[in-house]
Amino acid sequence: MAFGGLFLVLVTLAIAAPLWENVAGRGPDQTNETGQIEVDGEKVNVVELDGTPIGPQWGSEYFLGADANGRDVMVRLLYAARSSLLIGIVAALLTTLLATFVGLVAGWYRGWIDAVARSTLDVVWAFPVVLLGVALGTSLAIGGLQLGPVTIEAGSRLIPILVIAIVFVPYMARPIRGRVLALREKEFVEAARAQGAGSWRIMASELLPNLTSTLIVFAPLMVANAILLEAALSYLGVGADPSWGSMIDDGLEKMITAPHLAIVPGLMLVLTVLALNVFGDGVRDAFDPRAEVRVGR
Amino acid sequence: MSGFVVRRLAQMVIVLFAVSVLTFLIFNVIPNGDPAVRMAGKSPTESQVEAIREEWGFDRSLPVQYVETMRNVLGGEAISYFTQLNVRDQIVEGIPRTFALAAGAAILWMLGGIALGLLAASRAGSKVDRAITVVALSGISLPAFWLGALLNYYLGFKLGLFPNGGYVPFTEDPLDWAYHLILPCTTLAILFVGFYSRVLRANLLETMGEDYVRTARAKGLPQRQVMRGHVLRNSMIPIVTLWGLDFGAVVAGGAILVETVFDIGGVGQYAADSVGQLDVPPVLAVTLFGAFFIVVLSTVVDILYAALDPRIRVTG
């Protein structure tokens, strides 16, 4: 539970990002390569001539110091928390929706619908996760996507969200399909059918409620893995910016003079994912201790 | 049984075909994906682009291009659009590197998983057990690229305990080869070891409650012998299955980030480099290579299960 609380604190911090932006007086993307700030009454370069950024000031301005382009690390960190959490949560929700739909329909109708659904899941499954993510991310990041009336601009957060959501569907759809296959033989489904309930009615009001524990067990782990994959994608340059992944990527170039630039966003990432994993572990023990849940890697 | 095997093999071929078509489409239907323009370099003339288009066959219809590219990929004659190097040669050079990394890591995470799992199960509920749970969950919460970069920087570059990335062929210097692989393998293993110890712990605790274990104890077998001969042996079956699947997944692309961070130069790194340039032939070849491992291993596991449990054959 303590870890669930930690996750709530992180969410609050992410929501409060614009507040800190006001305190710091600069946005997450505002560079300041030649500027100076006052430290102990002396003017100091934000970025030294040799490219070394200023360290943590522990005050309103440059609380955690600057990065190589003179951007405020603290402000970026909080905005990165926003994109990581937003992308992670929305992608996980989308995965859950897609997987529930596929699992229900495949398990209920069986026959050729099940065969098509399973082959589709197999294809997505066989695609190496990171490679698929980078492939879709790169191809969409250049020109965006235009599908009929829907236009997704390059650099939109929708790109990583869609990529992550699709990639994780098989991990969740397969156990759901398995549950549905077992549930459809139960007496209460037979009773509903005898009363004349149609397929969709049975799926929505008889089967879906019985999937709740599976969905609840998966939810925190889905978000955790979505956040990890988002970080990997933005580390490779095809995710959001600022994001913890892109900040680590930037920071690794300044490892010698300013190691905290790569370490701090990494710690935030680990804390967030760990909080979700520990929370998810507790949820699993409470709802379905024998469930073998695994997502990603 | 043979009908099941044939069905599973047919499915495997269909999935691989679908993966290849999908990969091809992703890189060809996207906007700004015209490889001729990108290959022509900065500010090309229209006739230069046209010449490249004709030379590489980009002016033909997509199905024809797909068949042509696939024939080259499968025949080992595909050429990268950008480096002009033979794709098969690059992959063949990368395979031992990727395999060495994956195998080393797999051995480490298996041994670590068994040790931690046994320790946790034998003291279930104690502080040690809870500490192992936290360690395990931390392991699956770490981003591979971050952990790898930090280990490489602090242990490799700063303290000089390990080489700063890179790979030395086994035939050149076996000791140096192993020395270069220690950090990358450890990084990769840390990501898996927690999960394995948790699964093994759960299996062990379940097996310990079985009747035949009680019988063995009642016979007067010493605790150590019961654990080794009865409990551990039966708890290992699911783990070994998992191990096979995970090894396939790591070879197939799970190691991309670790390979890149430590500059191993394996198949995964080749894939990452090619994907960034939208270089279709290498990406297609590497994706098929990866998908092949994943699909083959899961097919083998399915067939093995079906051989052991006849009920699966009917529903599968």
Image (tube, coloured by chain):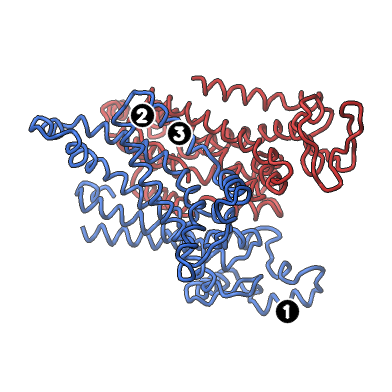
Chain colours: A red, B blue
Q: Is residue A204 visible?
A: no
For mark 1, name the chain. Answer: B
Q: Are marks 2 and 3 on the same chain?
A: no
Q: Which residue is more in the foreground, B133 or B223?
A: B223
Q: In which quarter of the view is residue B133 placed?
A: top left
Q: Position of residue A252 (x, y in %)?
A: 68, 47
Residue shown at 71% from the left, 54% from the top:
A143
Query: Which of the marked residues, 1 or 3, is nearer the chain's N terminus?
Result: 1
Which residue is painted at 35% across and 33% down in the image?
Answer: A291
On screen, residue B2 versus residue B19, left or right, reads left
A229 vs A179: above or below? below
Q: Are marks 1 and 2 in contact (CB under 8 Å)?
A: no
Question: Please, is residue A20 above or below residue A122 in the view?
Answer: above
Image-based side of A60 in relation to B38, left or right: right
- Find residue A54 and report its horizontal and vertical position in percent: 80, 37
Q: Which mark is residue B135?
A: 3
**Are labels 1 and 3 on one chain?**
yes
Q: Which mark is residue A282?
A: none
Q: Which residue is mark 1?
A: B51
Residue A138 location (% of width, % of height): 65, 54
Question: Which tag is nearer the camera, tag 2 or tag 3?
Answer: 3
Indicate the quadrant where residue B116 lies: top left
Tag 3: amino acid: Val
> In the drawing, what numbered circle is on residue A197?
2
Of the pair B17 and A21, the residue shown nearer to us: A21
Residue at the image point whose x is 24% and y is 48% from the top: B312
**Mark 1 or mark 3, whichever is nearer to me:** 3
For marks 1 and 3, give the CA distance.
59 Å
Looking at the image, residue B227 lies above or below residue A287:
below
Element on which disc 2 rests: loop
Type of the residue with mark 1: Ala
